[in-house]
Image (cartoon, rainbow, N blue to C red):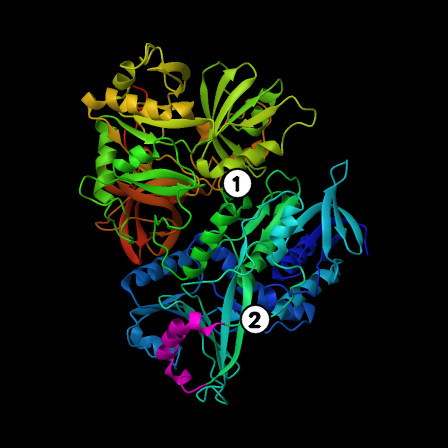
Amino acid sequence: MKTQARVVVIGGGVAGASTLYHLTKLGWSDVVLVDKNELTSGSTWMASGNVPQFARSYNLTKIHDYPVKLYPTLEAETEQHTGWKACGSLRIALVPERMLEFKHVHMKDKTLGINSYLVAPEEMKKIHPLIEPRGILGGLFHPEDGQVDPAGVTQALAQGARRRGAEIYRFNPVKAITRSPSGEWIVHTEKGTITCEYVVNCAGLWAPIIGAMVGLRLPIIPMEHQHILFGDVPELKGTGLQLPLLRDPDSSYYMRQEMAGVLIGPYELDPKAWHPQGVPLDYAAQSLPPDLDRINDVLTAALERVPALKNVGIQQKVNGPITYTPDATPLVGPAFGLPDFFINAGHCFGITECAAYGLYTAQWIIAGEPGIDLGFADPRRFGDYANYKYTYEKCRQAYRMMYAIEFPHEERPAARNIKTGPIFDLLKKQGAAFGQTYGWERPLWFAPEGMAPEDKLTFKRSNWHEPVGRECRLVREAVAVLDLSGFSKYEVSGPGAEAFLDYLCANSLPTRIGRIKVTPMLTPRGTFKCDLTITRLGPDRFYVVSAAAAEKHDLDWMLKRLPAEGGVTIENVTYRYGALVLAGPRSREVLAKLTETDMSNQAFPYLTLREIMVGPYSTRALRIGFVGELGWELHHPLEYQRGLYQAIMEAGREFGIGNFGLRALVSLRLEKGYIMLGGEISSERTPLEAGLDRFIDFNKGDFIGRQALLNQKEKGISQRLSLMIVESDDADCLGDEPVFRGEKIVGRVASGGYGHVVGASLASGYLDLDAAGPGTELEIAVFGDRRRAVVVPSPYYDQNNEKLRS
């Protein structure tokens, strides 16, 4: 066995084999894989082998599309049987909302060139001859979907890696992982130690155990999943008929042909976790006791849909563990706080997704970034709040809602109220409907008296549309407060702090104490990595603020780039300080009643910070905002928040003060053309494409991504972020909709919503340059209907920023 390698991959399921395969395909041959047992002896052995292209988001669709292209080539490349069969797949809708979801996915598929077709009920039997179409409203058909033998595919990936120099050591469990004094990783296995630069945890069911060896708590829990194989169906036996994979998400099952039989995989409403606090190390490819009582209702629905199964007996019952995370999305990417330690685990759709996740993990290791934005799968999206109880509740919810309609803005109920601020109860009494971000409960909107603060789930405008409109007008016309205490907040200090931040930031740092700069941090490719505001607190001291969801991600990005010689300290002060946003044209008058500090525009200009007293409460007042109005972020010791909030509300009573929530914030920021993480901000886009040249200082010296931006500046961009008004009277863009100019797709929506003050449906998206100019007539496919759209100047509201700087 080798004692040195560049990369050690731990885990011999499809995730580990794919990671190893793609490392070698990208040119690294000094790589090894270790597994405690035989390959595929974890969850992979009992996977169903379905390979669907269906996904609700743009990048997840890319992930699902990749195996449809890779798997058909593996057998010829490796001479290893994979069982690939292009059978297509049909999803059916039993409720109108499901058809809206299908229409959205179908139009998103067009932006990627993926073949999918909306199917009317009368066409169903042409695609699936055994189906009973009664009660079906329509469907979505992907003709290129397929199925494989999970063990065969895994062995083919392993064989491909071996042929390019990789080595695989089976029956060789990992006992410990340590680091050498020089920083290399040492993987201690039963058969010896391997020293390496990189470790990739692909251990599947045992990924939490491997993570614990290096101090990580991974929010992964195995859930039992049952497959029921029915015997030969007379209509299939000897006929040569090949049925497509059938999914009935409204009844919560998939069904696929297996030779002349049929396999059904239900997702029950009362799922069962299996060894949620740690899977036994001696488990390997063993079926668990089946429990048909848990899935009888689902099986009954399946037999009604395909009546040919009613007279066919059950041939085999399989129950096995599949890993889940709190949001049913895997953990893929760098581990927090551990240099060169990666995770590729937590897969509940392993055969479908691990082909691509193995590729992107390999790219991340070799090139420093994956080929697409994987923020939705980044392991650092969970904080310490994701403890066992939280993970258990969320994983059970994720399993039973696997096929649930994903409504926009949906806030699911499990494991709530994890992180609440001092005014949570006060906001709740005033009608706040809350959402959860990184464990924080944050107000989304406020229900007026007599209305329940609960979202009605829909793809159209919901019950909160009018209340949010009132909040928006309150901000624009008077004054309102928003609790954004979940902001990630750091203090960076020390003699090397300025040089350290200057190299990480694309904009120049503030030179004077009390000045604020908005700046991105970039990848070496010049794309967005972090989006920050930085305030100079002293000669060698800075206050850095970023999005709540990015707390661990942004901290990790900075920590891993600290200078070796020291001189820089980063302190996470997120939980020390709360943040109240006070915004609106009367906000200065409210503060003037509470402080002796001169709040005038001359004394307290835009993009400055002052340490002030608001009543008896010491506060860092930052004159900055995300709504495009006069306003301040009031950062304060969290223990002061209750009193501070009550004092502000009392002082603002004569000006008509009220609360506003995050949904109003999103509407207001769209009117201003401001960009958001998870929408316009992506590791696939650059500030030049986003029109943020003003936040890049090419003259300040070197910074991460500078050369890449200079190259792009010289070559020119092909797309630019633009703001569009969409003709729509009942629904707004969600994101990922294609933008048409005639019959040509010229761009894609990044985010959308309703601008309550400008009175228009708005969409922000990246467009080809010849379509990006104001006045350009376009069309956007909103749930399948092409709606007229026109490019407008951005910002659309207060184009000269007079209100913001007043």
Corner quadrant of residue 133: bottom left
**Residue 513 image offset from top left, x and y in percent:** 48, 14
Residue 713 in the image, given as x and y percentages of width and height = 51, 34
Between residues 222 and 546, which one lies in front from this camera angle? 222
Q: Taking 599 as reference, is 565 above or below it?
A: below
Residue found at x 38% / y 72%: 297
Res. 763 image quadrant: top left
Q: Is residue 90 above or below residue 529?
A: below
Image coords of residue 407 (percent x, y): 34, 53
Query: Where the N terminus falls, by quadrant?
Result: bottom right
> Which quadrant would residue 806 be assigned to in this image?
top left
Residue at (77, 39) in percent of width and height: 180
Disc 2 residue crowd, few under 14, some 14–19, many 20+, Cα 10 Å? many
Question: Under tag 2, what secondary structure?
Answer: loop
Query: Can you identify the residue that label 2 sits on?
Result: 148
Q: Secondary structure at mark 1?
A: loop
In-front residue for pair 299/696: 299
Please give the range of residues in magenta: 291-312
**Residue 264 at x, y percent in the picture:** 46, 74
Give the residue at mark 1.
384
Kindly identify the amino acid type of the residue bearing the numbered disc 1.
Answer: Asp
